[in-house]
Amino acid sequence: MIQEDEISAGITGFIDILGFGNKVLNSNTLEDINNVANEIKKVQEEFEYNDPERDAMDSDLPTKTVLAFSDCVVINIPLESESTVYTGTFDGYMFEFVRIALAQIRCIQQSIFLRGGIDSGWWYNTDHIVISQSLTQAYKVEGSADVPVIALSKDLYDKFENHPDKKEFYGDNSGVLESMFELYDSGDNTFHFINYLEIVLQNINWQTDAEQRKKFDAAETAEERDTIRNQGYQKNTEHCLEVHSSQIELAFKNAKSEKVKNKYRWLSTYHNKIAKQWSDNEDLICEI
């Protein structure tokens, strides 16, 4: 019999690896199988990745589960820990969405595009058996997403919008959700999705290489250090946008149907909207 302490509450993501089902179906040799296995391991590793510095500060963060299957990955994040007793759960949720955004961009940089759904609810995973309210709901959300993004259920977004911690710590007009989630509206379909490119750029590192770090350490004034940092931010921002754009253009070129091409047309529009907010460099515009 299932015990109460075997069931956790949190958020679950069902992440589909686009085009991967066909790769699995067409894998008929040991080399083929190894290739698809290595690729899905990459995705699993990206979603399992934790920031060592942040985790050192938050050592009591709950452990996430990342399960890999033939053409998808399932992520479960229980958000009850010693720290949430004092800090609440809202920031914990937002931090995990930053991690998901970073995993998503790292996958895209390896030509792996994702479409997913996320919802909250209960989760049970014991003896190779997974039963989950949140997983069932996340699967439905993924199925309704029209484009290569990770969508939230309406109920989950509304929970964040009305979360008591959000009002207490950020105020009614903080804009915290607007920077984390983007609204998709095709006329026939509407949902919020993780605004992964914006999140990544907001969290980008200024350091570029060892030589730059030496110059920073040798700088004699705060102004010199600020200049080096700002140049590093700009360089890393433009590199991120350049790679993201080129991967969308490549995926569009390789798409086999007009329906799939339209998904990457939409993604290029999303890219260009963010790119124009972060840089005046026209070379970073996605052209398909």
Image (cartoon, rainbow, N blue to C red):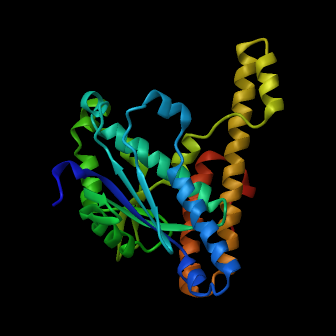
- Identified at 67% across, 51% down, the residue is 240
Q: Which quadrant is the C terminus positioned in?
A: bottom right
- Identified at 73% across, 50% down, the residue is 281
Looking at the image, how many numbered discs can be counted on the residues?
Answer: 0
Q: Residue 223, how many percent across, how many down?
A: 72, 17
- Identified at 43% across, 74% down, the residue is 146
Establish if 187 lies above or below 25: above
- Identified at 28% across, 40% down, the residue is 80
Would residue 288 be seen by someone viewing this image from the given angle? no
Closer to us: 153 or 100: 100
Q: Residue 10, how many percent across, how many down?
A: 29, 50
Q: Which quadrant is the N terminus positioned in?
A: bottom left
In terms of image quadrants, where is residue 95?
Answer: top left
Most extreme residue toward the top, as rendered?
220
Q: Residue 48, how many percent across, how many down?
A: 51, 51
Closer to us: 182 or 17: 17
Establish if 144 lies above or below 258: above
